[in-house]
């Protein structure tokens, strides 16, 4: 009987396996994951698979500027996606731009998750004046337009990857805090938390060992949605000229560089990076949407 009981999976293991089966049974979820994984692999291997290093001025020739897709340079190199106004290979610039977009999205989402989750758990568990103060700060943060706060911060801090990550963390952490606080309030009223308090377990142990694991599905869904938001915000800020410096070919900056050439028919400089950015954002949003349906049984048919 003991061996049989040990072979029976616990509720968390069973729920995890059931969620994995539901995920694999969803063509939308699997397709979105494959598309996002493709871009991640392409960004990771960019230094090895890119035909040109857009950061190296020795590899860029101004004489090759504004060449249409499929053109060849004087050295015999084929520009499959054409070149921009500076003579950079668009395929290489897009691969490196994907790296910047994913780095900004992942890092800003991770740090915002850490800050917001900590604030939300403290507000839900401590209650009283601590909850009131923390949630009023969250309400104040959410009352301002996200893009406006990010613009003001970047005007003060300047350009740079670290600056834009910091700005996005500031404008995103409140979403995690409010969501986690709401879920933690529900979990904190359940019997297992009352039992843990009756056993005189410490507050940190109850939060990390009992409340937080049951908040993870919701946190995961919010994290995917906020990562897509961070990628789009970075592209918007770079397009406006306040995100990354011109020496960092992010997708938003590539779109901005080709915007002035659209009327002259040189569409590839702006349209191709725009399509790549759209594919990344759509895949992440679809992934988060399907995770929400899979992890929340109330949203399933």
Image (spheres, rainbow, N blue to C red):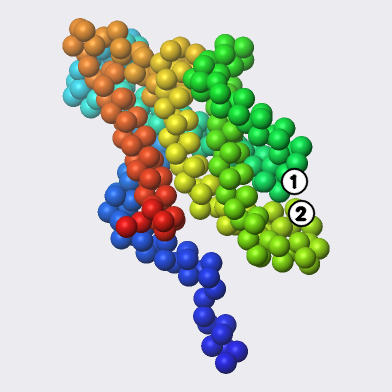
Spot occupied by residue 88 in the image (x, y as percentages of width and height): 34, 18
Look at discs 1 and 2 and give the one toward the viewer. 1
What residue sits right under mark 1 in the picture?
A: 126
Of the 4 image quadrants, the one containing the C terminus is: bottom left
Of the 4 image quadrants, the one containing the N terminus is: bottom right
The answer to whether any part of residue 33 appears in the image is no
Secondary structure of the residue carrying tag 1 is helix
Residue 138: quadrant of the picture: top right
* Left or right of 28, for residue 168: right
Residue 60: quadrant of the picture: top left
What residue sits right under mark 2 in the picture?
A: 203
The residue under the point 64% across, 42% down is 120
Spot occupied by residue 258 in the image (x, y as percentages of width and height): 31, 14
Residue that sits furthest to the bottom in the current view: 1
Question: With respect to residue 209, does 130 lie above or below?
Answer: above
Question: With respect to residue 203, does 166 lie above or below?
Answer: above
Is 216 in front, or is 181? 181
Question: With respect to residue 68, does 194 lie above or below?
Answer: below
* Left or right of 22, for residue 214: right
The answer to whether any part of residue 141 appears in the image is yes
Question: Looking at the image, is mark 1 or mark 2 earlier in the sequence?
Answer: 1
User: Mark 1: few, some, or many residues within 10 Å (few <14, many ≥20)?
Assistant: few
* Marks 1 and 2 in Cβ contact (< 8 Å): yes
The residue under the point 71% across, 62% down is 194
* Left or right of 271, for residue 4: right
Is 81 in front, or is 206? 206
User: Whole-Å distance between the Cαs marked 1 and 2?
Assistant: 9 Å
Secondary structure of the residue carrying tag 2 is helix
Is 224 in front, or is 76? 224
For residue 74, the mark is none
Spot occupied by residue 43 in the image (x, y as percentages of width and height): 41, 36
Spot occupied by residue 228 in the image (x, y as percentages of width and height): 43, 35
């Amino acid at each position: 009987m003991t061996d049989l009981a040990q072979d029976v999976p616990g509720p968390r293991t069973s729920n995890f396996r059931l969620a994995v089966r539901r995920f694999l049974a969803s063509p939308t979820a699997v397709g979105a994951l494959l598309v996002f994984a493709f871009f991640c692999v392409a960004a990771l291997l960019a230094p090895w698979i890119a035909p040109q290093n857009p950061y190296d001025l020795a590899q860029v020739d101004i004489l090759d500027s504004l060449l249409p897709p499929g053109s060849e340079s004087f050295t015999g190199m084929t520009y499959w996606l054409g070149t921009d106004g500076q003579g950079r290979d668009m395929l290489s610039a897009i691969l490196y731009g994907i790296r910047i977009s994913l780095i900004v999205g992942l890092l800003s989402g991770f740090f915002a998750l850490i800050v917001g989750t900590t604030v939300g758990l403290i507000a839900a568990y401590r209650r009283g004046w601590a909850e009131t103060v923390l949630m009023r700060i969250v309400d104040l943060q959410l009352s301002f337009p996200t893009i406006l706060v990010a613009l003001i911060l970047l005007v003060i801090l300047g350009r740079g990857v670290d600056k834009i990550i910091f700005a996005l963390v500031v404008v995103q952490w409140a979403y995690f805090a409010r969501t986690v606080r709401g879920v933690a309030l529900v979990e904190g009223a359940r019997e297992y938390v009352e039992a843990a308090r009756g056993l005189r377990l410490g507050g940190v142990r109850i939060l990390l060992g009992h409340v937080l694991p049951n908040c993870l599905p919701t946190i995961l869904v919010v994290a995917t949605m906020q990562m897509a938001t961070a990628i789009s915000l970075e592209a918007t800020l770079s397009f406006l000229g306040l995100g990354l410096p011109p020496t960092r070919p992010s997708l938003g900056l590539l779109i901005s560089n080709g915007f002035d050439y659209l009327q002259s028919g040189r569409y590839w400089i702006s349209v191709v990076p725009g399509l790549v950015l759209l594919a990344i954002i759509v895949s992440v949003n679809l992934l988060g949407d399907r995770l929400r349906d899979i992890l929340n049984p109330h949203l399933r048919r």
